[in-house]
C-alpha cells in the first residue's frame, strides 16, 4: 500500500467532466485486467460527490482526500485503494470490497456498508495538513483525526483483522458483523449495536462501549482490559470466564447470568417434559431451560421438542439423535456440540453459536403441516455461527440462513433445496476430501 503522508496543503478539489471520468475509468479497467496502456486511477483530491461508481473495479486506485460524499459505490471493488482522509459521508458502499484499503482518517459518517468487505483495512487516525493564521510561509502544520464511522449502517460487514484503534464508532449498526482479530483498542463504540457480532480474538482494550448492545455477540478470547461496559447488554453473549475482570463498569452489565442445575433436577425436568409432549400438554410440564449451563452433558436421544432453550450453554454436549423439533435455541452456545442425527425440524437457532459443532445427518428442514392451519415451519438459522461446523449429509431444506456464517463448514451432500443463500456468509465452506 502506498504511503499517505501529507505534504503541504491539499489543493482545491477538481471536478472532472463525465467524459474525463469515463476515460479515467477505462484506463483503470485496462490496468486491473492487464491490458496494454492501462494505468491505475489517480483521483486524489478530486470531487466525485454524488457520482455513481457502483460495481466499478477501482482496486489500487488513489483516492487520497477525495470528496466521495453521497457517492454510490455499491458492489465496487476498492481493495488496496488509497482512501486516506477521503470524505465518504453518506456514501452507499453495500457489498463493496475495501479489503486492505487505506482509510486512515477517512470520514464515513452515516455511510451504508452492509455486507461490505473490510478485512485488514486500515481505519486508524490520519494526519491532515493545516494552515494557521500567522504561520510562516512554507511551514505546514498537521492535525490528526480519527476515522469517523459514527452512525454507519454496516450490518453483516466483514472487518476481520481491521485496524480500528481509536476509531469513532458510536451509534454504529454492526449487527452480525465479523470483527475477528480486529484492533478496536481505544475505539469509541458507545450506543453501538453489536448484536450477534463475532469479536473472537478482538482487541477491545480501553474501548468505550457504554450502553452498547452486544446480545449474542461472540467474545471468545477477546481482550476487554480497561474497556468501559456501563449499561452494556450482553444477554446471550459468549464471554470467556475472567475476561470481564479488568473491565470498567462490569457491575452495571445487563443480561442474565447462566445458572447450573443439579443432575437430579435436570432428569426430573426432562421426565416432566416427556409427559407434556406425550399428553399433548395435558400432563407434565414444558422444559424451560433458558439461561442454564448444560455444557458437556450427555443428552443423547433426549426429547426436547418444543423446549424453551434460549441462551442455554451446551458447549461440548452430546445431543446426538436428540429430538429438538420446534425448540427455541436462540442465542444458544453449541460450540463443539454433537448434534449428529438430531431432529431440528422447525427449530429456532437464530444467532446460535455452532462453531465446530457436528451436525452430520441432522434434519434442519421444515416442520410440516403444524396445527389446525397445517402450516409449515422452517428452521431459523438467521445470524447463526456455523463456521467450521460439520454439516455433511444434513438437511437444511427451506431453512432461513440470512447472515448465517458458514465459513469453513463441511458441506458434503447437504440438502439446500429451496434455500436462499444470497445473504449468507459462505466464506470458504468446503467439501471434505
Image (tube, rainbow, N blue to C red):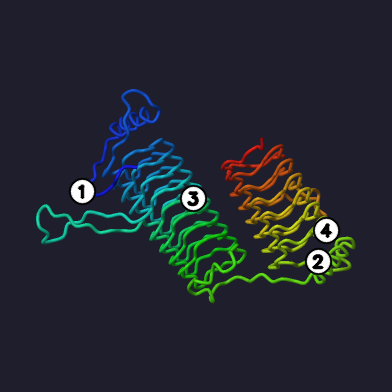
User: From mark 2 to mark 3, how far is it between C-alphas?
Assistant: 41 Å
Q: Which quarter of the rendered picture does the N terminus lie within?
A: top left
The residue labelled by disc 1 is 7
Q: Are marks 1 and 2 in contact (CB under 8 Å)?
A: no
Name the image quarter holding residue 143. Answer: bottom left
Q: Secondary structure at mark 1?
A: loop
User: From mark 4 to mark 3, how far is it between C-alphas?
Assistant: 39 Å
The image shows residue 140 at horizontal and vertical percentages of 17, 55
Q: Secondary structure at mark 4?
A: loop
Q: Are marks 4 and 3 in contact (CB under 8 Å)?
A: no
- Identified at 22% across, 57% down, the residue is 142
User: From mark 1 to mark 2, how far is it between C-alphas?
Assistant: 70 Å
Callout in the foreground (4, 3): 3
Which tag, 1 or 2, sits closer to the chain's start?
1
The image shows residue 222 at horizontal and vertical percentages of 52, 61
The residue labelled by disc 2 is 286
Callout in the foreground (2, 4): 4
Which tag, 2 or 3, sits closer to the chain's start?
3
Q: Looking at this rendering, what residue extends furthest in the top direction? A: 36
User: From mark 3 to mark 1, how far is it between C-alphas?
Assistant: 31 Å
Which tag, 4 or 1, sits closer to the chain's start?
1
Q: Secondary structure at mark 3?
A: loop
Which tag, 2 or 4, sits closer to the chain's start?
2
Q: Which quarter of the rendered picture does the C terminus lie within?
A: top right
The residue labelled by disc 3 is 160
User: From mark 2 to mark 4, how far is it between C-alphas?
Assistant: 11 Å
The residue labelled by disc 4 is 303
Q: Secondary structure at mark 2?
A: loop
The answer to whether residue 62 is left or right of residue 386 is left
Amino acid at each position: 500500500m502506498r504511503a499517505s503522508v501529507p505534504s503541504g496543503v491539499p489543493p482545491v478539489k477538481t471536478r472532472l467532466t463525465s467524459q474525463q471520468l469515463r476515460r479515467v475509468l477505462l484506463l483503470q479497467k485496462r490496468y486491473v485486467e492487464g491490458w496494454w496502456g492501462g494505468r491505475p486511477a489517480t483521483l486524489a483530491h478530486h470531487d466525485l460527490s454524488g457520482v455513481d461508481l457502483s460495481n466499478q473495479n477501482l482496486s489500487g486506485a488513489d483516492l487520497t482526500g477525495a470528496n466521495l460524499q453521497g457517492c454510490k459505490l455499491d458492489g465496487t471493488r476498492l481493495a488496496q485503494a488509497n482512501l486516506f482522509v477521503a470524505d465518504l459521508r453518506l456514501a452507499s458502499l453495500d457489498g463493496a470490497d475495501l479489503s486492505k484499503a487505506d482509510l486512515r482518517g477517512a470520514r464515513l459518517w452515516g455511510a451504508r456498508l452492509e455486507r461490505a468487505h473490510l478485512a485488514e483495512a486500515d481505519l486508524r487516525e490520519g494526519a491532515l495538513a493545516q494552515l494557521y493564521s500567522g504561520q510562516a510561509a512554507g511551514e505546514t502544520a498537521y492535525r490528526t483525526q480519527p476515522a469517523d464511522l459514527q452512525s454507519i449502517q454496516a450490518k453483516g460487514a466483514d472487518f476481520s483483522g481491521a485496524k480500528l484503534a481509536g476509531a469513532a464508532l458510536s451509534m454504529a449498526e454492526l449487527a452480525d458483523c465479523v470483527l475477528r482479530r480486529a484492533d478496536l483498542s481505544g475505539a469509541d463504540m458507545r450506543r453501538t449495536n453489536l448484536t450477534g457480532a463475532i469479536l473472537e480474538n478482538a482487541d477491545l482494550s480501553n474501548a468505550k462501549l457504554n450502553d452498547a448492545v452486544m446480545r449474542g455477540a461472540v467474545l471468545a478470547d477477546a481482550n476487554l482490559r480497561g474497556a468501559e461496559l456501563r449499561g452494556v447488554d450482553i444477554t446471550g453473549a459468549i464471554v470467556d470466564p475472567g475476561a470481564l475482570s479488568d473491565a470498567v463498569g462490569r457491575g452495571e452489565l445487563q443480561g442474565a447470568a447462566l445458572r447450573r442445575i443439579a443432575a437430579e433436577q435436570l432428569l426430573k425436568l426432562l421426565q416432566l417434559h416427556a409427559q407434556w409432549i406425550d399428553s399433548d400438554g395435558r400432563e407434565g410440564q414444558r422444559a424451560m431451560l433458558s439461561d442454564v449451563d448444560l455444557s458437556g452433558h450427555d443428552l443423547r436421544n433426549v426429547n426436547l421438542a418444543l423446549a424453551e432453550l434460549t441462551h442455554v450453554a451446551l458447549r461440548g454436549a452430546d445431543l446426538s439423535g436428540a429430538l429438538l423439533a420446534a425448540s427455541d435455541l436462540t442465542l444458544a452456545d453449541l460450540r463443539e456440540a454433537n448434534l449428529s442425527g438430531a431432529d431440528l425440524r422447525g427449530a429456532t437457532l437464530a444467532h446460535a453459536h455452532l462453531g465446530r459443532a457436528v451436525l452430520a445427518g441432522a434434519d434442519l428442514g421444515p416442520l410440516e403441516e403444524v396445527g389446525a392451519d397445517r402450516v409449515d415451519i422452517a428452521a431459523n438459522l438467521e445470524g447463526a455461527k456455523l463456521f467450521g461446523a460439520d454439516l455433511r449429509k444434513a438437511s437444511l431444506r427451506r431453512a432461513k440462513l440470512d447472515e448465517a456464517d458458514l465459513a469453513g463448514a463441511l458441506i458434503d451432500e447437504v440438502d439446500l433445496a429451496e434455500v436462499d443463500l444470497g445473504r449468507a456468509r459462505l466464506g470458504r465452506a468446503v467439501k471434505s476430501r
